[in-house]
Amino acid sequence: MNKKTWVYFPLIIIISVAAGIILGNRLKHSSQTVFYPMALNKTNKLTTILQLIEDGYVDSVNTGDIIEKTIPQLLENLDPHTAYIPARYMQEVEEEMRGNFSGIGVQFSIQEDTVRVVEVISGGPSSKVGILPGDRIVSVNDSVIAGVNINNNDVLKLLRGEKNTKVSVGILRRSMEKMMDFEIIRDDIPLFSVDVTYMIDDETGFLKISRFSDKTYNEFMEGMYKLSQNGAEKVIIDLRQNPGGSLGSVLQIVDEFLNKGEDILYTEGLNSKRKTYSSSGKNSWKDLQVFLLIDEFSASASEIFAGALQDNDRAIVIGRRSFGKGLVQEQIPLMDGSALRLTVARFYTPSGRCIQKSYENGNEDYFNDLYSRFTHNEQLHADSIHFNDSLKYYTKSGRTVYGGGGIMPDIFVPLDTTGNSEYFNSIFHKGLIYSFAYIWADNNRETLSELNSWKEVDNYLSRQNIIDSFVKYAAERGVPADREGLKLSGEVINTQLKAYIARNIMGEEGFYPIIEKIDNTLQKAIEVSRQNLIVGSLTIQ
């Protein structure tokens, strides 16, 4: 199947980092877009050729099939996020949007005859075992599915199933040479978009948003009130690996941080007049200092959030350059039950920066951009990014920011490579930390369930010396103990073991406070929040 034909599995609010995130529904009613009636009503070369085939071709043909195969090829000449959804998939897409099924918790697409993971549902079965966006699923239950002309329906049949049933998948990751094997237990897919809210210390709260859905604003406000009641004077909002989503929700949330009349974003396209979105002045959290975390997987609505607060000098943005997805799609139903998701405009931050990165070199280069960033060491060194002075913009206080695709953070934090070793890579290839954590948690669930907080779980696990049990477990599965490897990676392995065990018992409220210890971006944000720092008009004390 052509790479432009996307299947959304299993999302309630469908967000596609690689296939296009639909944030334009609100625009449909508030801006003037002109592309109706459809061009099929006009006589053109394509319709003429089809008519000639029907009237004069030597054999009988099904012109409907020809059209279905031609549309994706036609759309490939446009941007990477305009997509066609055939009628036969619409029911499945709608079912998945409602979330009334059990599965492994990934969104995938088939490109170059390979099933690629586009998104991993936060807190879902695949997330729990360590599947990542960009992974290639090459086998399911020992059946090879790569390079065999598999279609979306066949993949769905293999990955879907009853709750609590198991499925084994073989994963290829571009940064890894060997295939990794994961055993996933199917489950109902989580619908929450605010993963966790907790206090890091007496004055600093943490809130992670995994995507922006119609319910995100209410979840966000509930989490913020919880932090406020616990004495939060500062908040770290984590948008890392957040692929975007509902425009309405992100507008509502940003509105809670800005004064009346401050711009949030504007959209504009050739057939879509400029539409500016400004704050209404709610500004419920005007007294809170704000720190935003982003990375290369933060896209679309996440970039709107970060760009709006950065351009208005309302937050310090920390991490790495965001994805660069700033195209607006509208979904247009077609008469046979199919739909076209057509890009109609671009997003711009208040300073005028276009969020969308370039796709002038074609879709293949566009989709491989993240790997190109790794090749050029952008994730490791901020000075590897070469800015163009023609794309220089200014925040409200006159601070310089750059366009060209994505949001560049105020404070760069490199990808953390500490704790790496051949031993760690070997156990990681096989997904052993995740599988051991599940087994250990399951075997000790009764005891662990009696503990009342993540701190109690952490303290209990620290007394169990679980890393020794894990080393034995790994050796039995083909990764012998490595003293030097453990010396380099022991702290990372032990912390991950405890965090994933806690996740299996307490969910995200157990996972995040423990994994925080080895999260260098979050640790940097905590450090910055405790310093006297001036960025633009922001003074952090």
Image (tube, rainbow, N blue to C red):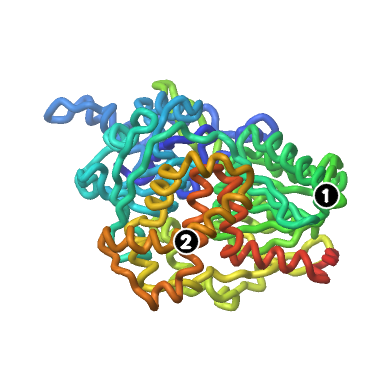
The quadrant of the image that shows the N terminus is top left
The quadrant where residue 337 appears = top left
Disc ID at residue 129: none
Give the secondary structure at mark 2: loop
Disc 1 marks which residue?
231
Q: Please give the name of the residue rendered at 57% of the width and 45% of the height, measured from the top-left corner.
A: 508
Q: Please give the name of the residue rendered at 56% of the width and 42% of the height, measured from the top-left corner.
A: 506
Q: Position of residue 182 (x, y in %)?
A: 33, 49
The quadrant where residue 217 appears = top right
Q: Please give the name of the residue rendered at 55% of the width and 48% of the height, measured from the top-left corner.
A: 243
The quadrant where residue 59 appears = top left
Q: Please give the name of the residue rendered at 32% of the width and 37% of the height, measured from the top-left corner.
A: 166
Q: Is residue 317 visible?
A: yes
The Cα–Cα distance between marks 1 and 2, rounded to whole angstroms, is 35 Å
- 252 horizontally vs 481: left or right: right
- 227 horizontally vs 430: left or right: right
Q: What amino acid type should be assigned to the residue bearing mark 2?
A: Asn
Disc ID at residue 465: 2
The quadrant of the image that shows the C terminus is bottom right
Front disc: 1 or 2 = 2
Q: What amino acid type should be assigned to the residue bearing mark 1?
A: Gly
1 and 2 marks in contact (CB < 8 Å): no
44 in relation to 300, above or below: above
